[in-house]
Amino acid sequence: EAGVAQSPRYKIIEKRQSVAFWCNPISGHATLYWYQQILGQGPKLLIQFQNNGVVDDSQLPKDRFSAERLKGVDSTLKIQPAKLEDSAVYLCASSLNLDFEQFFGPGTRLTVL
Amino acid sequence: EDQVTQSPEALRLQEGESSSLNCSYTVSGLRGLFWYRQDPGKGPEFLFTLYSAGEEKEKERLKATLTKKESFLHITAPKPEDSATYLCAVRASKLTFGTGTRLQVTL
């Protein structure tokens, strides 16, 4: 069974530029998550989708971050414009449904200069 | 506000030296507690799910237990390949991760 795929693996941009990350979850998983993980910290949930709909985006900085999940499968996370403090690893995860264990992708390491 | 605290922040063990990692939580309406292992440069890898106090799960040298206020991850006779960061996450009204315990096992 294929795992969660993410791209790109690494991205370096300058502040005020925009960037997008892509995630393909495990086939059949209804729930998809985006996390931000700063070095030395645990993952922080940014947004959670259940199929096409948003379940929780309470910690998403909506003035600069946006996310969508088209057709309940792939998802993209965008940052526009980026700030220095956005430097982090962005993790995508999926689960069969709410309350089930999550399976994580390898993450995208973002560096904002 | 939901809170998850892991201790210790870092732990260094010799091979074969058993120990326990702690995850204490303050949430309303626990719907599940998850343990993950994270290696450097990789995403977290699922280990266990616990749903109710008294529940225990085992896998190789790892055993997870749950009470009403905390969970323990017991590591028996660890090996160097067990070196990683161990994360716990709690699902109540939302999902909250702890900051992890960095475990190093030396020969």
Image (tube, rainbow, N blue to C red):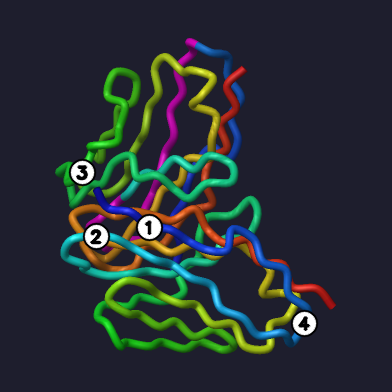
Please name the residue that numbered disc 3 is placed on.
Answer: A56
Per the rendering, the mark at residue B15 is 4
- Secondary structure beneath dot 3 equals strand
- Secondary structure beneath dot 2 equals loop
Please name the residue that numbered disc 2 is placed on.
Answer: B27
Q: Which of B88 and A54 is in front in this view?
A: B88
- Residue B69 left/right relative to B15: left
Using the image, name the chain to which the residue with label 4 belongs. Answer: B
Q: Where is residue B69 drawn, in percent x and y?
A: 31, 71
Q: Quadrant of the C terminus of chain B?
A: bottom right
Amino acid type of the residue that numbered disc 1 sits on in the rendered structure:
Val
Q: Which residue is drawn at 62% across and 81% down?
A: B19
Cβ atoms at labels 1 and 2 below 8 Å apart = yes
Q: Is A20 part of what is drawn in magenta?
A: yes
- Residue A82 left/right relative to B41: left
- Residue A110 left/right relative to A58: right
The quadrant where residue B88 appears:
bottom left
Q: Is residue A28 above or below residue B71?
A: above
Labels 3, 4: one chain: no
Cβ atoms at labels 3 and 4 below 8 Å apart = no
The mark closer to the camera, 2 or 4, is: 2
Q: Residues within 10 Å of mark 2 (few under 14, many from 20)?
A: some
Amino acid type of the residue that numbered disc 4 sits on in the rendered structure:
Glu
Labels 2, 3: one chain: no
The mark closer to the camera, 1 or 4, is: 1
Q: Residue at x 20, y 43 (%)?
A: A56
Please name the residue that numbered disc 1 is placed on.
Answer: B4
Q: Which residue is drawn at 49% across and 13% down?
A: A17
- Residue B80 left/right relative to A4: right
Mark closest to the chain's N terminus, 1 or 4: 1
Mark closest to the chain's N terminus, 2 or 4: 4
- Calculate the distance from the C-alpha at mark 2 to the C-alpha at mark 4: 35 Å
